[in-house]
Image: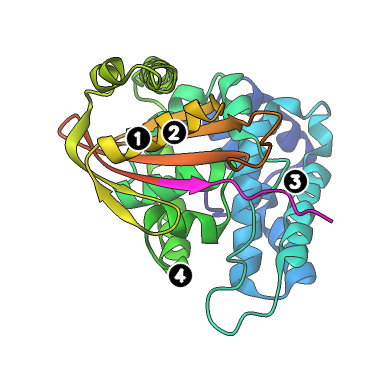
Amino acid sequence: MLLPTSAPGSADDTVEQVRSAQRGDPAGFALLLDRHYAGMLAVAHRLLGSRPDAEDACQDAAITAFSRIGELRDPAAARSWLHAIVRNNCRTMLRARVPVPVGVAGENLLASELDDPVACIERSAMRDWVWHAIEQLSPAAQTVALLRYFTTNNSYEQIADLCGTPVGTVRSRLSEARRQLADVLPRVQDQRHGETAALRAERQQEAATILSAVPDGARLNEVAARWAEDMTFWWPSGIRTIGREPVFAVMRQDYESGVGAKITGVLAGSGVTIWENAFINPPEDPYHCPPGATWLLKEKEGLVREVRLLHTPRPTRF
């Protein structure tokens, strides 16, 4: 996220940097990370060995720390707090490591369960700065960053399914997103930032309205007018359909079977919207639908031109 350049300063400097970051000054966080990044990387190397995996663990830890800085009660404990986040990420990566003949190590790794950036950023004075920076990313980098750090179905493999790309491409795009953020964040910190909450609220209302309009076919076409009539829809099975009606037909079938759907999260970026929803199955058919889904909506000239759907895996049954 923010790349380290040096590690000067004293313990008093660390306390002031933490307090500055907690007041909403991004420069304070950048200095804090500069000071402690080398130690974070050393921890990751001891646990993981692999330099790429260690870098991933530290970069994910930086994003987690950035979103959770307001929760650090003792600024003097910043070093141990940062190292603990790194160790947690490393343990998650070690648990996820499985022998794979082909692919990218860590492709099934989920982002840290402790990392809930959306909720934390919403409570932070820095949220406009963060979202403004994310909006500056290239479309491909922005999409994988949003999916990785702000959604539930966020393993490399799940992101690859949603984006229709190989896992290796997801990893390279995520690295590119980090590189771009390292460049963008310092440049935009003093700019006036557009309010992103309004767009996100608008998209959330749109998602909830579309799902609630399922029983009424005529109204569904009306409220989903932003979906191009010739849009492409990619199903979790890999099947592609053209137009809105095949999607709406399945939604109506689920509704008629007693299935409900509840929006649990919406993200809005430049040309991309991401929905997350939970399915509420009827008691007599508890496995009719999976637990939930992630929808990736890609827009062009104000219209949704492509949608990709990914189902949330069912919990393992023993």
Pointers 3 and 4 in contact (C-beta within 8 Å): no
Amino acid residing under circle 4: Gly
Amino acid residing under circle 2: Gln
**Image: 169 above or below 61:** below
Q: Residue at x 36, y 21 (%)?
A: 193
Pointers 1 and 3 in contact (C-beta within 8 Å): no
Q: Quadrant of residue 223?
A: top left
Q: Which residues are magenta?
A: 309-318
How far across and down, in percent of the image, does residue 70 sit? 70, 25
Mark 1 or 4, nearer chain start: 4
Amino acid residing under circle 1: Ala
Residue nearest the viewer, comparing 238 with 180: 238
Amino acid residing under circle 3: Leu
Kindly identify which residue carries mark 3.
82
Relative side of 148 to 91, left or right: left
Mark in front: 3 vs 4: 4
Kindly identify which residue carries mark 2.
253
Mark 2 or 4, nearer chain start: 4
